[in-house]
């Protein structure tokens, strides 16, 4: 058996930083602060069935969704870690109605703000299904002083880093700083994330589609036509494709990233602007997928070119292997064409 040197996340970050001659270390330090909080959340996730942390708080978050106790814990851990780091001047969290501006002197002059979904897929907490954390790091637009709303409302292509953590059978961190995508698995024996998935590339031709088909009656015809296309037997294109849907974006996305596929949460009659949040979920995942060779679109435009107007803005999303994303967009464009010919606006 060949001995292979284990590369820890800290070692990887230091080496990556050497590739940027003008790097001063703030971003690297900020990533480590996020990872530290993720370790704390992972510890609680692993023992959640043994303590009074599962279940709900009896309140709802800004989106009207019931707040789980573990959601609150995760939110607090990330906010506290970022507040004390000194490398972040503010956080926008899916669990908070407004952004949080840090008022200590060092934070006021920090370069970065963070948008975060502290615990994605929280409806799965009580049934022991994979959940996760999604984060996005932006360089602030203002120069100094307390951060303002403008610092957070930036298009996705302005992200300097993004990533997610999957709390599952193993705990994995996947992130990008705009120079490819790398994955790290937490070794609980040493408490360190170790490089396990270097230079991740998503297959151009996927075989998996992920969508909640119970909402079929609420989808546009074009989306249903694409889903039907996925089910048709055709040896030349290796169809039918497999339907895999966990209900936790981070888990569905991670599987498709490694195996090839498409994750879809389209607009619906009940949610015409989509349901997933642009800043906390869609932008960071779009950054990662593009760096891995895939695509992310709202059906109308590239996700990372959408100009956010509010913190909790929602958007439809189709994200994954290039060929599959191109195909669903083809159906969407055909529907628009038919609609315009028939005088129907979309």
Image (spheres, rainbow, N blue to C red):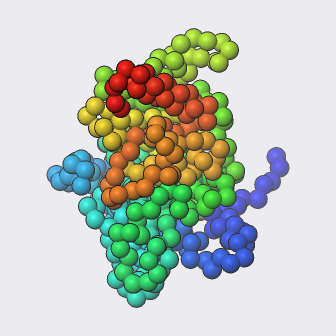
Residue 31, picture quadrant? bottom right
Query: Where's residue 35, x and y in %?
Result: 51, 64
Query: Depth check: 39 or 265 in front?
Result: 265
Residue 220 vs 280, above or below: the answer is above
Query: Depth check: 200 or 20 in front?
Result: 20
Residue shown at the point (39%, 24%) measured from the top left: 339
Query: Where's residue 83, x and y in %?
Result: 39, 76
Residue 105, picture quadrant? bottom left
Residue 197 vs 78, above or below: the answer is above
In the displayed structure image, the side of residue 13 where residue 317 appears, left or right: left
Point out the image quarter for the C terminus.
Answer: top left
Most extreme residue toward the right is 2
Residue 177, picture quadrant? bottom right
Query: Depth check: 200 or 301 in front?
Result: 301
Query: Where's residue 50, x and y in %?
Result: 33, 51
Residue shown at the point (28%, 65%) measured from the top left: 98
In the displayed structure image, the side of residue 289 where residue 214 appears, left or right: left
Residue shown at the point (72%, 59%) measured from the top left: 6
Query: Where's residue 233, x and y in %?
Result: 57, 11
Most extreme residue toward the bottom is 105
Query: Depth check: 121 or 87 in front?
Result: 87
């Amino acid at each position: 058996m060949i001995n292979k040197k284990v590369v820890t996340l800290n070692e990887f970050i230091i080496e990556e930083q050497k590739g940027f001659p003008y790097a001063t270390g703030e971003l690297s330090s900020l990533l480590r602060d996020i990872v530290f909080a993720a370790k704390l959340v992972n510890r609680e996730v692993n023992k959640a069935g043994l303590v009074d942390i599962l279940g709900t708080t009896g309140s709802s978050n800004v989106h009207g969704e019931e707040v789980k106790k573990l959601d609150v814990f995760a939110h607090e851990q990330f906010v506290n870690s970022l507040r004390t780091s000194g490398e972040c001047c503010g956080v926008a969290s899916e669990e908070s109605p407004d952004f949080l501006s840090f008022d200590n002197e060092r934070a006021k002059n920090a370069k970065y703000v963070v948008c975060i979904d502290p615990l994605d897929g929280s409806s799965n907490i009580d049934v022991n299904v994979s959940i996760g954390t999604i984060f996005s790091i932006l360089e602030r637009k203002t120069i100094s002083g307390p951060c303002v709303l403008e610092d957070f409302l930036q298009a996705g292509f302005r992200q300097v880093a993004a990533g997610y953590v999957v709390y599952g059978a193993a705990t994995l961190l996947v992130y990008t700083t705009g120079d490819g995508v790398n994955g790290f698995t937490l070794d609980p024996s040493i408490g360190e994330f170790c490089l396990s998935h270097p230079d991740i590339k998503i297959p151009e031709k996927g075989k998996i589609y992920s969508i909640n088909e119970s909402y079929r009656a609420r989808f546009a015809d074009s989306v249903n036509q694409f889903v039907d296309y996925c089910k048709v037997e055709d040896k030349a294109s290796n169809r039918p494709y497999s339907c895999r849907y966990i209900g936790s974006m981070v888990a569905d996305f991670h599987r498709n990233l490694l195996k090839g596929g498409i994750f879809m949460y389209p607009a619906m009659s009940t949610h015409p602007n989509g349901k997933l949040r642009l800043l906390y979920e869609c932008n960071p995942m779009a950054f990662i997928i593009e760096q891995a060779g895939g695509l992310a679109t709202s059906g109308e435009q590239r996700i990372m070119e959408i100009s956010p107007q509010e913190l909790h803005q929602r958007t439809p999303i189709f994200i994954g292997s290039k060929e599959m994303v191109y195909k669903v967009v083809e159906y969407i464009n055909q529907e628009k064409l038919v609609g315009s010919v028939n005088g129907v606006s979309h």
